[in-house]
Amino acid sequence: MSDTRAIFDVPFALGMMALHEARDLQAPTALADWIEARLDEGLCWFDHADIYGDRAGETRFGDALGARPGLAERVRIVTKASIVVPARDASPFAVKHYDSSADYVTAAIDAALARLGVEHLDHFLLHRPDPLMDAEATARALDEAIAAGKIGAAGVSNFLPEAWRRLQAAMSHRLVAHQLQLSLAHATPLFDGLFDAVVGDGQVPMAWSPLGGGACLQGETGERLSRLAEERDASPAGLALAWLRALPGRPLPVIGSLKAERIATLRRDAAQTLDRASWYALLEAARGHEVA
C-alpha cells in the first residue's frame, strides 16, 4: 500500500476533460510540448475517460505521444469507461446507460490503448456503478487485463462501498484507486462514511472537481480562503487543494485547468501545510456552521 501512495505522491493529476476544446493544443507537437513541460515540473499523472470529447481527448493525447518519442514512457495514465452516452447507444432507445459487462470492459480497455497509442494503462477505472454489473464476470475481465499487462491496476469511480466490495470480493487483484467528488464545496463524503470506507479499504482517493467547479472560491468560503491566502502569500485555489491534501490518505486532486501559469501556481500552493484550526475554519465557512 505504501508503494501505491508513493506513486501518487504528487500535488495533483491533470484532468483531460477539456483537452478537446483547447485550441492552442490542437497540433500534436504543441500538445507534446505541453505534456513535456508538465513532466519536467514533476506532474506525471494524466486523467482521461472515453467520454471526454467523445474519445477525442484520448485520441489527441495519443497523437501527441506519437509525435514525441520517449514521452509515452514518462507519462502515467488513468482512464475510465462504462458510461454509454445516447449517441453511442445502438438500441432504439438512444438512452444513456452504464455498461460494466466483461465484453464491454475488455473492448474499452483495448480501444483506450489504441487511441492513446500506448501498450499499458497505469490505471483503468469503472467510471460509474452499474446496477446490472455481474461482479464475477467484470472482476474476471479486470484481472485478465492486469495479467496481460494491459493495465497496471484497476479501480472505480463514484461507487458506494457495497458495490465496490462486491467487485473486490470477486477479484484476485486489489482495487487500487477510487475517484470521488470531494472538495470544500462538497465535503459530504467526509461525514457520510464514504471517504472513510475508501481509505479504510486501502484505495487511494482521487478527488474530482476539487474546487467544486469554482464554488470553493465564492461566498464565505472564498472570502476565508482569500484572507488566508493573503496571509500566506498563496492563491485561494491552491489552499483549497492543500485542504484536500491534508486528509488521511492524501487525496490526489484532479484539476481541470490546462493553463501553464495556473498549473504552476497550484503546484506551488497545494504543497502548503494547513494547521488544524485553519483547516476547520475553512470547513466551517464551507458548511455554514461549526462542527457539532
Image (cartoon, rainbow, N blue to C red):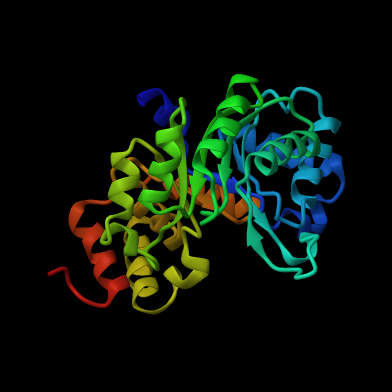
Residue in the image at 82% along x and 29% along y = 68
Q: Residue 117 location in percent, x, y?
A: 79, 32
What residue is rendered at 28% in x and 61% in y?
A: 192
The answer to whether residue 246 shows anywhere in this view is no
Q: Residue at x 64, y 21 (%)?
A: 149
> Residue 73 location, x and y as percent?
69, 23
Q: Is residue 122 left or right of residue 115?
A: left
Q: Residue, x 75% and y 29% (percent of image)? A: 118
- Residue 258: image x %, image y %? 66, 53
Q: Is the C terminus in the top left, top right, bottom left or bottom right quadrant? A: bottom left
Q: Is residue 156 above or below residue 39?
A: below
Residue 65 seen in the figure: yes
Quarter of the rendering occupied by the N terminus: top left
- Foreground: 74 or 231? 74
Q: Nearer the viewer, residue 286 or 149?
A: 149
Q: Which image quarter: residue 204?
A: top left
